[in-house]
Amino acid sequence: MTIRQIFQRTAALRPTLALGEQLSHVLDAARRAVSVDRLHLWALSPEGDRLVYVTGSGLSGQDRVSLRQGAELLIAQAGAMGNAVRDKVALIVDESGSRLKSPRSATTALCAESFVVVPILARGRTLGLLVADNQTSLAPLVPEALHLLPTFALHIATAVDNTGLLTELDTRDRDLTESLERQTATAEILKVISSSPTDVQPVFDAIARSALRLIGGHSAGVARRVDDTLYLAATTATTEAGDEALRNVFPVKLTGQGALGKAVLSGLPAYVSDFETDPAYSPAFRETVRLRGYRALLAVPMLRKGHSIGGITVS
């Protein structure tokens, strides 16, 4: 079952199931998709000082007694979980013999030597965490199998943020607008794919346009990876000189020095806050950036089965 099918099925359950039950279904599907023993959902309190346990999948009877719904965990005592909340980044922890610091009521269920923590983010704010482990089977956590967790975290963020269950942020109108924008972007790309089954260029162009619109950026680009080289697949227009300068940069060897290269090689997002002050970039590349009219850039990898096949940038 694909992620889209999972969430279509979940959406169909909404009229008859409470949100808590819907989240349990999503967690069950996510746990099977990434092949982990247990998957926990924690919500960040409105005060931002503690995590509150919501629900879990794959828990034993003993786990459920130890980690009851509503159990709380202070951020200051949450170890890697607290770091994920503060830094808004996913973490894989593998420390034999280590234990998460936890309240007495949650000690048993949180005893895991290896685990992964994925923040649930909406509009740049942390709503909660997904925490996965293989404490039952003691099998190693395989990064290639975990790359779907952030996607599930994104869908959960949309669901719980729209209901106001985990946090009180903006109005429902804004929630609905953002959700519709994401659906529209996805629909546009799928429409292009279906109408151009043998031509990938329109698909790359649609991805660049959608990324630019969703992020509200200045420009966007898509690069594809072939062995150790990046090729420019699509870009949105800026100035004539800037567009030509960017095309002259590619193809480029994949060294991992720039934001795009780092994202492709690491499989994680990379960010440049200011090209004018970042020493990693040459004067020639800064001139290209100036011609295109921006100073900051976000790069994210395009992943297929855990392997980076390219990247998307938004300035």
Image: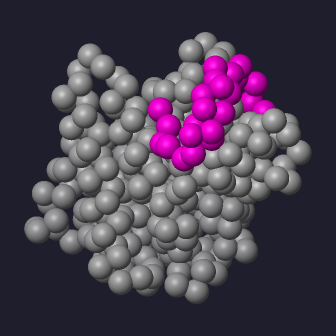
Q: In this view, does 21 lie to the left or right of 303?
A: left
What's the magenta region? 234-257
* Relative image position of residue 93 (x, y in whole percent): 68, 46
In this rendering, is residue 111 above or below 285? Answer: below
Please name the residue shown 44% across and 41% down the image.
Answer: 208
Q: Can residue 181 be seen in this view?
A: yes
Residue 248 counted in the magenta span: yes
* Relative image position of residue 48 (x, y in whole percent): 60, 80
Residue 226 counted in the magenta span: no
Residue furthest out toward the front: 240
Q: Is residue 113 visible?
A: no
Given residues 85 and 295, the one toward you in this image is 295
* Relative image position of residue 75 (x, y in whole percent): 67, 73
In this rendering, is residue 164 above or below 234? Answer: below
Given residues 145 and 32, the one toward you in this image is 145
Answer with the quarter of the image where residue 114 lies.
Answer: top right
